[in-house]
């Protein structure tokens, strides 16, 4: 048993340095090119699948992902300083890369105002100016200065672009607050109310040789051309849009200036498609699109111009170079994945992996070559692949949102509601029984059995199936079918009788069953919306976020390897390994997992774990020796709707993790009764490490006006433990009504809206389109005082909605009075 050492509230800033983790691989799609930076003959390209270095001298490409040391695969900005260090803005912090080491700066170890870094540039003395989702930061290499709307003239905290003129003035484009000029002391704000700026949502800024500012605005206001490209000469404003110029679209995503002064403008639109690239020489417009040029896509996201005046054009379909005669494509993906949204995976049958994506079709990967099957190049019925199974003859049975495809490696056979007995075309799961029958679960039509000739359909009307909306399906060693439904619980079918298990008649914790797996001892492992259940045929054992190390309540995928270890994929908590006694957690913060939302899991013949993620592509984990305890800081602070705990370790040895314990005092009675600590959560440790590690935990289960005392219980792999010192913080009721800006914004497809109530109130929270038509009702009920978070999923609304600006409106009424506020959000597909 080692002693846990606490050095309390050290005020030094530590910057963790990460190197490549050989245990992990990330396979990503890097076609969405967010930013391009040029360093002599090197191109540094930031994508949604990681960072790419292209050496044009020797024609080599190097890919960097979370497995290389990046904190996130989503790269939004890059600048190169005077020392040649690359400064990289990601969705999880700021990174400095010196060619060997990655140094991470985030909200936990620095004064960076937000981990979503949208823009970076350097000034004449190499200060870094960093635009984030929640403020502007200046970093001189040692000290941070943060500018927000609350402490400066910055008109809005979300900073999308920064340009610096020859007088070292900073021109700052914000998302909703217009344009700000900052000379180091004074602020001047230009917006649609006090100037000729037509729109306050600014995505890009460029300054030409004569000092003119070229400003790209984005937005969606039906029936108006009041935005587009803007020129500001210091006195006059000139607006170029689709109506009065050759600009192909009013959504201006990027601007670059070539050596002869031409303006190159990349466009998008409210549908998320774009209308191409424009060149403007001050008089004439030339438009390049996929129909008249080698442009890869009409959605142009980023632009850069190299020393030879070549135009580097980043789109949502890759990177292309244009010398005004020839178009040259570059590879920016480290795999053949057509998208980073992966829904299903089959890796365990042989050396070939089959991967199903949300919108890009089916992918075959043999370890070297990638082959994509989609509706354009094959008979695949739909590009959304929900499930994959293989029969004894090696045929692949592919579940899609357009029916079932059987693929024998040469020929496709399609089964749908039009040509077969399939009850519904949206297929959620496929399993093959001991007799070779195919069991096909659908989202709305129940369960189908197909014996290669005849179809039998089982649904809630004609059989004992508790619901026709099926999420999961598994077959045990006795050929029993186990069916997980949306809200009807779990069903067992032995080909004659149905047995229903639900939260009322069994130990099933919740009736929404997302995932199923049957281990070698015939135990059923059942993933629900509220925890994991083990059922041995008689007894139920429940694992949830309160009584175990399960990192998230919603269990989306399960696989059990030969050793008996359970691997559990969750909605927001990442990946968990459970060996029947201890839990090991892998997430975006403590591992190279690219995304915490796990869609599917499988284990290949070598024991590697193949992990399909919602937005991070595919991760492969080759578990080896555990390589990440002197505690250097531990503090607590009020954070949004709860209390945030942050702590750091300098070294760790055999560290399983930290239980978070709390003592909450609400009244004098609690003091008199000398209430003790209770366990409120668990954070996975790093195992063994000699580098700095940062941890955090948010407690949102809080009583109003309470005094909360926290301590950490650090636990070794052998079960021994030690306590940290205690920290105390007071949590008070919100004093006023408030509605906060959604995050992320823009978003696709999910964003979070927060609001606060000072007392019990009747609450309505609704989303409207720009014309005032209701899109969704998120809240419509009485709520007690407190702070709340609500998710809005654009894909869950009854009718599909397009990219564009929407409004969300909070109305609350209670003893504290009435409150109404409306804010904007942007869906950007």
Image (tube, rainbow, N blue to C red):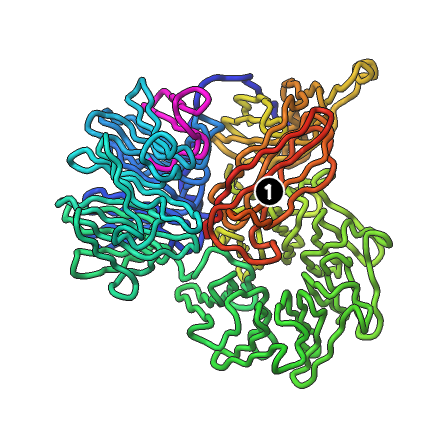
Q: Which span is picked out in magenta?
A: 133-161
Name the image quarter holding residue 231. Answer: top left
- Residue under label 1: 585
In the picture, measured across the screen, residue 565 lies left or right of residue 670, that is left
78 vs 395, nearest the viewer: 78
**SS of the residue at dot 1?**
strand
Task: Please tell me which residue is depicted at 58% across the width and 64% down the height of the picture.
Answer: 386
Q: Position of residue 659 (x, y in %)?
A: 66, 31
Query: In the displayed structure, would residue 680 be above or below residue 77?
Result: above
Q: Is residue 757 toward the left or the right of residue 169 in the image?
A: right
Residue shown at the point (41%, 32%) measured from the top left: 177
Query: Nearest the camera: 46 or 608?
Result: 46
Q: How many marks?
A: 1
Instruction: Quadrant for residue 27, please give it.
Output: bottom left
Whether residue 461 is situated above or below residue 663 in the rendered picture: below
Q: Residue at x 45, y 40 (%)?
A: 91
Residue nearest the viewer, comparing 421 with 205: 205
Q: Position of residue 350 (x, y in %)?
A: 53, 68
Q: Is residue 552 visible?
A: yes
Residue 461 covered by magenta stretch: no
x, y percent for residue 22 = 44, 47
The quadrant of the image that shows the N terminus is: top right
On the rendered structure, is 323 left or right of 345?
left
Residue 496 occupies which quadrant of the picture? bottom right
* Residue 103 in sight in this render: no
Front position in the image: 684 or 544: 544
* Residue drawn at 53 percent across, 55 percent down: 801
Q: Which residue, as the protein is rendered here, is positioned at the far bottom? A: 453
Badge 1 crowding class, 10 Å Cα cut-off, few under 14, some 14 to 19, many 20 or more, is many
137 in the magenta segment: yes
């Amino acid at each position: 048993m080692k002693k846990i050492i606490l050095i309390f509230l050290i005020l030094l800033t530590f910057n963790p340095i990460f190197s490549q983790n050989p245990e992990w691989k990330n396979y990503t799609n890097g076609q969405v090119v967010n930013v391009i930076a040029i360093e002599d003959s090197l191109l540094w390209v930031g994508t949604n699948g990681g960072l790419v270095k292209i050496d044009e001298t020797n024609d080599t490409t190097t890919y960097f992902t979370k497995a290389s040391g990046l904190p996130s695969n989503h790269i939004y900005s890059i600048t190169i300083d005077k020392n040649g260090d690359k400064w990289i803005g990601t969705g999880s912090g700021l990174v400095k890369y010196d060619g060997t080491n990655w140094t991470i700066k985030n909200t936990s170890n620095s004064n960076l105002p937000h981990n979503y870094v949208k823009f970076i540039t350097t000034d004449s003395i190499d200060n870094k100016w960093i635009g984030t989702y929640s403020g502007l930061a200046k970093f001189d290499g040692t000290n941070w200065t943060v500018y927000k709307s609350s402490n400066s003239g910055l008109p809005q905290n979300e900073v999308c672009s920064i340009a610096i003129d020859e007088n070292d003035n900073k021109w700052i484009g914000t998302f909703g607050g217009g344009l700000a000029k900052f000379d180091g002391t004074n602020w001047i704000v230009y917006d649609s109310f006090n100037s000729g700026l037509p729109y306050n949502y600014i995505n890009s800024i460029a300054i030409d040789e004569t000092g003119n500012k070229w400003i790209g605005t984005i937005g969606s206001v039906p029936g108006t051309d009041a935005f587009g490209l803007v020129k500001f000469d210091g006195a006059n404003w000139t607006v170029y849009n689709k109506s009065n110029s050759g600009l192909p679209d009013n959504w201006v995503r990027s601007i670059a200036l070539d050596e002869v002064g031409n303006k190159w403008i990349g466009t998008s639109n409210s549908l998320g498609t774009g209308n191409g690239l424009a060149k403007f020489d001050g008089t004439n417009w030339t438009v390049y699109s996929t129909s008249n040029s080698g442009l890869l896509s009409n959605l142009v996201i980023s632009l850069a111009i190299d020393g030879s005046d070549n135009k580097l054009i980043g789109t949502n379909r890759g990177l292309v170079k244009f010398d005004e005669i020839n178009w040259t494509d570059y590879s920016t993906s480290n795999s053949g994945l057509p998208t980073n949204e992966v829904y299903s995976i089959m890796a365990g049958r042989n050396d070939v992996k089959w991967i199903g994506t949300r919108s890009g079709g089916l992918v075959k990967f043999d370890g070297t070559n990638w082959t994509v099957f989609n509706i354009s190049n094959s008979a695949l019925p739909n590009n959304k692949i929900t499930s994959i199974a293989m029969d004894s003859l090696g045929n692949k049975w592919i579940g899609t949102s357009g029916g079932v495809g059987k693929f024998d490696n040469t020929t496709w056979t399609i089964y749908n509601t039009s040509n077969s007995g399939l009850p519904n075309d949206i297929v959620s799961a496929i399993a093959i029984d001991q007799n070779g029958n195919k069991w096909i679960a659908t989202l709305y039509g129940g369960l189908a059995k197909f014996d290669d000739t005849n179809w039998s359909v089982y649904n809630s009307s004609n059989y004992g199936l508790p619901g026709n909306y099926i999420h999961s399906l598994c077959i045990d060693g006795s050929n029993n079918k186990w069916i997980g439904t949306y809200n009807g619980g779990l069903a067992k079918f032995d080909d004659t009788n149905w047995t229903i298990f639900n939260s009322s008649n069994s130990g099933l914790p919740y009736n929404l069953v997302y995932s199923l797996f049957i281990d070698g001892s015939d135990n059923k492992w059942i993933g629900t919306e509220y925890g994991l259940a083990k059922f041995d045929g008689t007894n139920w054992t429940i694992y949830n976020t309160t009584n175990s190390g399960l990192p998230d309540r919603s269990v989306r995928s399960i696989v059990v390897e030969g050793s008996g270890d359970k691997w559990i994929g969750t909605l927001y908590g990442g990946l968990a390994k459970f060996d029947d006694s201890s839990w090991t957690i892998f997430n975006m913060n403590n591992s190279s997992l690219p995304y915490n939302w796990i869609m599917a899991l499988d284990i290949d013949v070598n024991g590697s774990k193949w992990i399909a993620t919602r937005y991070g592509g595919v991760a492969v984990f080759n578990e080896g020796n555990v390589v990440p305890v002197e505690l250097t800081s531990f503090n607590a602070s009020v954070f949004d709707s709860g209390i945030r705990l942050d702590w750091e370790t300098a070294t760790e040895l055999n560290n399983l993790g930290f239980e978070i314990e709390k003592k909450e005092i609400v009244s004098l009675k609690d003091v008199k009764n000398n209430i003790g600590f209770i366990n409120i959560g668990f954070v996975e440790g790093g195992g063994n490490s000699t580098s700095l590690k940062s941890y955090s935990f948010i407690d949102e289960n809080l009583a109003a006006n309470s005094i909360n005392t926290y301590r950490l219980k650090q636990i070794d792999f052998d079960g021994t433990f030690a306590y940290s010192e205690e920290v105390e913080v007071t949590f008070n009721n919100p004093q006023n009504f408030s509605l906060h800006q959604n995050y992320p914004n823009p978003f696709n497809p999910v964003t979070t809206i927060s609001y606060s109530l000072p007392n019990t109130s009747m609450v309505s929270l609704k989303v409207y389109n720009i014309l005032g038509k209701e899109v969704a009702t998120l809240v419509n009920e009485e709520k007690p005082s407190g702070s709340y978070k609500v998710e809005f999923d654009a894909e869950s609304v009854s009718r599909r909605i397009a990219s564009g600006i929407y409004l969300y409106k909070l109305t609350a009424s209670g003893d504290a009075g009435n409150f109404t506020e409306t804010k904007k959000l942007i869906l950007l597909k």
